[in-house]
């Protein structure tokens, strides 16, 4: 009867214990819990590893005063480094704010997103609006280079 060497046992045990981080360069698409599309773009980081370079989400923003509006947001640039299969991105821009977390497992990314936007109701009156925290799930769909928007934040109304 043959026995495995201690080295073979150690290698096999370490392979079993490896986490299932499988983020790949490309685009993950899916939906949030409101059914709106979410897109996460992963790229190679300049210092090695991976980073999130694109994020888009849609949802209902709930405004002070009771107005509910469908809105979409997008972010582009070096948003967040992915470390141990996880990332977070929080940013405040003039036109939009976002707070998000990401967890990569296998060919999926899951997480939470909340964003807020100021909405102009008239030429002189605006109101603060924000989504409820949304959970999302997106699946790796393409390793083709994603369309890169100029670095920044974008917001647009959605018809719901």
Image (tube, rainbow, N blue to C red):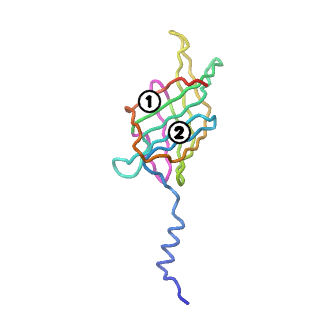
- Check the picture and name the quadrant holding the N terminus: bottom right
Residue 97, position as x, y percentages in the image: 50, 30
Q: Which residues are magenta?
A: 78-96
Q: Nearer the viewer, residue 19 or 159?
A: 159
Q: Which mark is residue 153?
A: 1
Tell whether position 77 is magenta.
Answer: no
Q: Which mark is residue 100?
A: 2
**Residue placed most toward the observer, 87 or 55:** 55
The tag earlier along the polypeptide, 1 or 2, is 2
Q: Is residue 85 magenta?
A: yes
Report how far apart the C-alphas of labels 1 and 2 lie in the structure: 14 Å
Kindly state the secondary structure of the residue where label 2 is placed: strand
Number of the label disc, if any, that sits on residue 101? none
Q: Is residue 9 above or below residue 62?
A: below
- Identify the residue at horizontal 47%, vertical 32% (top origin): 74
Q: Position of residue 78 (x, y in %)?
A: 39, 40
Q: Main secondary structure of the magenta part?
A: strand
């Amino acid at each position: 009867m043959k026995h495995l060497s201690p080295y073979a046992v150690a290698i096999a045990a370490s392979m079993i214990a490896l986490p299932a981080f499988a983020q790949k360069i490309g685009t993950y698409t899916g939906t949030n819990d409101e059914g709106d599309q979410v897109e996460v773009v992963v790229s190679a980081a300049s210092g090695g590893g991976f980073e999130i370079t694109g994020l888009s989400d849609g949802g209902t923003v709930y405004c002070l005063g009771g107005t509910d509006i469908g809105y979409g947001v997008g972010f582009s640039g070096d948003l967040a480094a992915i470390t141990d299969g996880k990332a977070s991105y929080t940013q405040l821009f003039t036109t939009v704010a976002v707070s998000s977390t990401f967890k990569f497992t296998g060919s999926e990314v899951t997480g939470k997103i909340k964003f807020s936007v100021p909405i102009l109701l008239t030429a002189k009156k605006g109101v603060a609006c924000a989504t409820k925290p949304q959970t999302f799930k997106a699946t790796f769909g393409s390793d083709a280079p994603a369309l890169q928007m100029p670095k920044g934040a974008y917001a647009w109304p959605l018809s719901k």
